[in-house]
Amino acid sequence: MKIATWNVNSIRVRLEAVLNWMNQAQPDVLCLQEIKVTDELFPIDSFVTSGYQVAVSGQKTYNGVAIISKYAMNEVETGFPDYDAEGQKRFIAATIGGVRVVNVYIPNGSAPDSPKFVYKLEFIRQLHSYLKQHHEAKEPLILTGDFNVAPEPRDVYDVDEMEGEIGFHPKERAALAELMGWGFEDIFRRHLEESGLYSWWDYRAGAFRRDMGLRIDHIWATMPLADLSLESGMDKEQRSLPKPSDHIPVWAIFDAERIAKKHKA
């Protein structure tokens, strides 16, 4: 089972690129962030004709998340049960082949002295609370999406420059570490340990050309699934295409046969 996450920064602008990548990469499940359209304007038919099902939680102009799956999706949630996230569409979850897939778009935070930074930390806290209240770490569960936090020094292009800045602030890294402590493993880091592997580059200042990036898009799994992961990676070439998103797809492959056996058991 190949699961991918991609902040597309507008599905309408990036639809052709997404469809082309899906045709090439053949993900079983693709989680999107920043779709920037309402549910009724999401191009569902473009994915259905390729054999996928779609679940959407969108809003006009900003935010919005979606899950696109080759397999049936059950128990779809579009938002936290106990937290409205200030009306912003940043959370969607579904059960796919016995695996609970939670797709989130964690707020950027704007600046450490901004109310938006407080909101970012609260969102992470509420996500942690949701997991503690509604799930157990022994379940097969994937948490994925644009977390807007680089967890470790090897995940940023320049530690000294980024220290204390949005995306690498100690408070948000601590909040993310606490969230991981609920029972997750970073699947990308399970398979790839080297530094200099990024999933986002700013559009400004020639950041991509200069490789000034951050690894802020993640696929985490609980231990029952982490032990079944086979491979993980990113598709950096997507950032070089015309009109690219500032993020690239991140993916992980799990042993589908063993997942199916565990699900039946």
Image (spheres, grey):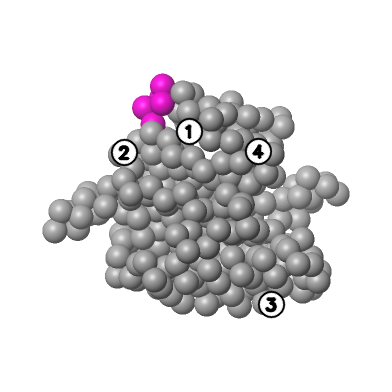
**Badge 1 density bin: few <14, some 14–19, many ≥20, Cα 10 Å:** some
Q: CA distance from mark 4 to mark 3?
A: 32 Å
Question: Nearer the N terminus, badge 4 or badge 1?
Answer: 1
- What is the three-letter code of the residue carrying label 4? Lys
Q: What span is colored magenta in the figure? A: 48-52
Name the spot of residue 70 as percent of width and height, x first: 35, 36
Disc 3 secondary structure class: helix
- What is the CA distance from the residue labelled 1 to the residue labelled 3? 36 Å
Q: Mark 2: few, some, or many residues within 10 Å (few <14, many ≥20)?
A: some
- Residue that badge 4 annotates: 60
Q: Earlier in the sequence, mark 4 or mark 3?
A: 4
Question: Does label 2 or label 3 sit earlier along the sequence?
Answer: 2
The picture quadrant where one finds residue 105 is bottom right
Badge 3 is on which residue?
Answer: 170
- Residue at image mark 1: 22
Q: CA distance from mark 4 to mark 1?
A: 25 Å
- Which mark identifies residue 71? 2
- Compare residues 148 and 113 and report the one nearer the observer: 113
